[in-house]
Structure formats: C-alpha cells, structure tokens
Image (cartoon, rainbow, N blue to C red):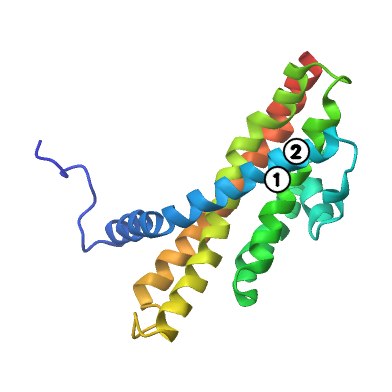
Amino acid sequence: MAPGDSEPPAGSLLGNFHRDLRDGIAVHLPYALGSALLVCCSVVAGALSQTVGTGQLARLPFTKLASSVLTQERSVAALVQADTELLAVLVIGAVTLGIATALGLVAQGVVVGIFLGSSVGTIRPVVALVAVAPHGLVKLLGLALAASVSFRLVARALAVLIGVHSRFLTNREWRQTGLVIGLAWVTLLLAAVIESFVTLRLVRLF
C-alpha cells in the first residue's frame, strides 16, 4: 500500500474535513502551546501565592468561572456547561485583543495552583494529584485550543493592519477555525466525562 492510500480522497467531503482539521491544528498549534505554557506558569504562581499565605491572585477576573471546573461531585452536563462558558470567554476574548483570553487562562491556572497550594500539609500529594491530573491534562488541551483561536485572530488582524496580509481570513481558514473550536469543545466534553466518572472514583479510592 502506497503512503497516503488510507487517507480519504482529497475531493471528498471526508477528505476535505480531514485536511481542514489537520491544517487548522497546524496553524493554531504555536498559539495553543503558548496558551498551555501560560496556564502552567499561572499554576505555579497560584500555588506560590497560596503557600505564602496571600491568596491575592484568587481575586483575578474569571477565577469564579474557572473554579467551577475543579468541582468533583458534579454531573457531566453541569461540567460541560461550565466548560462551554469558559470556552466562550476564551474565544470571544479576541474582541478584547486577547486580553480577556489571557486573563481566562491565567485564572484557570491560578485556581488549580491555589488548590494544589492549599493541599500542602492537609491532604496527601497523591490525592491532590489524582484530583486534578486525570481530567486536568485533557482540559488543558481543550482550553489551549480554544485560546489559540482568539490569539490567532488577533495576530491576523494586526498582520492585516500593518500590511503583512491583505485579507483577514479566507473561507477555508474560517472553516479551519470552526473545526478547531469544535475540537476544543469535544476535548472539554471528554475532560468532563473523565472528571465525572474517573477522577471522583480515584479520589475516593485514595
């Protein structure tokens, strides 16, 4: 079998979907990696803030919205609703030049960091780990993908303003953007299922 024989024909509906999703992920990947790094740095900041006893970072915008995704005893529907609201904040944050998106990511990381920081000396490290990691890593991927859309839209708008690009987005690029948003939501849905059916059981087990 020649390379690529297993892929759908380029002109087919499935083939176009596969190509647009693949290319969409590729162009958004640098922004997604940057978003994930921002969340991870915020986790460290939140943990340090809680450890030294200030906890001031908990007052950041969107921390109340972000904190809902850490609740363990919630139905999948409730978790998906909370995650969808946060996804909307991250994507629509493009109209604020990405400021709201960045704040949403920072808030998410800070909330996780505060949880981890407050667990020091109160619960076993393994319990804190299983309370966050199983669904948290999947959720991080979904949030990073959602935020990457906002940051890329802002970057493209600036590129148009300074003359690097003559057009904002082509029709195909809009389709790619929509597919990435859809993938982000499906990833958050998976994280909600893991949190509801796996994380809670692991916490009770340990």
Tell me whether the residue at label 1 lies in contact with that at label 2, contact meaning CB atoms closer than 8 angstroms: yes
* Quadrant (top left, top right, bottom left, bottom right) of the N terminus: top left
Could you say where residue 180 lies in the image, as x and y percent from the top left? 47, 58
- Residue 109: which numbered mark, if any? 1
Report which residue position mark 2 lands on: 113
Q: For this rendering, which residue is in front, 202 or 48?
A: 48
Q: Is residue 113 left or right of residue 145?
A: right
In the rendered structure, the answer to whether residue 42 lies left or right of residue 173 reads: right
Element type where label 1 sits in the image: helix
Q: Residue at x 84, y 26 (%)?
A: 119
Q: Which residue type does callout 2 highlight?
A: Gly
The quadrant in which residue 19 appears is: bottom left
Mark 1: few/some/many CA within 10 Å (<14, 14-19, 20+): many
Q: Callout 1, which amino acid? A: Gly
Q: Position of residue 153 (x, y in %)?
A: 49, 72
Q: Position of residue 146 (x, y in %)?
A: 57, 58
